[in-house]
Amino acid sequence: MSYQNNTASIFCRQLVLVVGLIGVIPAHAANLPDSQELMQLLGIKQQELADLDQGKTVSFDVAEGDEKELAAGIVIYLPAAPSKIIGFFKNKGAIAIDADVTAQGTIPLQVTLDTFKGFSFKSGDEATNFLQAAPGSQFNLSTQEFQTLKATDSTQPDAATQAYRKILLQRWQTYRKNGLKGIATYDRGNGTEANPKGELQTATQDSKVLARYFPELYQAWLEHPAAMPTGANEQYFWLNRKVEGRPTAILGHRVMMTTATGEVLLSRQFYVGHSYNSSQLSIACLPHRDGSLVFFAIRSFTDQVAGFGSSLKHSIGREQMVGAIVKQLTNLRKLLK
């Protein structure tokens, strides 16, 4: 598969909104600014507001702090109240607007292997490759997880599916107990690793607006499993999504919070089965006219944009990432009408 198609496939599932971008804001503030102020802070011009009112999207820059990072910001006007938009994400999830999501579900605190029954390998090459996996880029697994696969009895029915569900359970349990510190690295072979823990920590620490507007929420998000502030609602979720035609297990964590001036949603994917390492997403929905201005920021990490030709890969990746998100937002607008 070409790099361009691969990048689009990786990021098509991402749908997010922005809270972590701007600088000089009082630390005691308890609400987001109004839409006009936020647009000014983001450098969005008045004539671009007219584009938003006509149903177009407007992009803004989000600084990338890592060679493996792809980041972008998008603003869109949607004909629905902020609470309705956030409620859609909470109740419908990605499957409603992303045709590549084949299954999804919430993860309860009383989790069992059956929680992940929506993820399964069909018999064939993918299941075989998983059971025979070795350190590298084909699967995102730790050194210990690769060793566990070697000891798996591949003759048992659904051996690949059962082995993967155990990995998902263990990954969730360590994240739930230890937060970012509990995220294991991915063994790439030859002594190299990908570090989703460090990626997500950096992405969170760079959320300047979140830190200044909502310091308690920021600290809880950074130091999970610290207690969330009053009014914040947490969810853990899993997805089964096709990426590059392959089933991809994704484990995520999101927090939603209602403020006097709008709605905030934070989301991170702390485990992804292959193709990219991790992602962190933010959402701000502010009232505007008869609906909402929705600000999106995405910070995703993939080994595929590092190394030789990194600058070109980043340019292509950002462009295709934005295009994929806009496509999903178009679907969302239709569903909200």
Image (cartoon, rainbow, N blue to C red):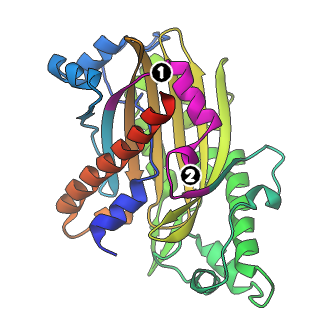
Dot in front, 2 or 1: 1
Q: Which residue is mark 2?
A: 270
Kindly identify the residue that appears in the image at 50 percent across and 29 percent down. 336
Q: Which residue is mark 1?
A: 80
Is 159 displayed left or right of 262 in the figure? right
Q: For the residue marked with disc 2, what is the amino acid? A: Phe
Q: For the residue marked with disc 1, what is the amino acid? A: Ala
- The x and y percentages for residue 186 are 52, 67
Is 234 displayed left or right of 247 in the figure? right
Residue 166 makes an appearance in the image:
yes
The residue nearer to you, when weighing 121 against 331, is 331
Whether residue 112 is situated above or below residue 163 in the rendered picture:
above
Kindly identify the residue that appears in the image at 56 percent across and 20 percent down. 83
Is 74 displayed left or right of 32 in the figure? left
- The x and y percentages for residue 4 are 28, 65
Q: Earlier in the sequence, mark 2 or mark 1?
A: 1
In the rendered image, the residue lying farthest to the bottom is 155
* Quarter of image, res 275: bottom left
Q: Indicate whether residue 219 is drawn in magenta.
A: no
How far is disc 2 from disc 1 in space, using C-alphas? 30 Å
Which residues lie in the magenta part? Answer: 75-102
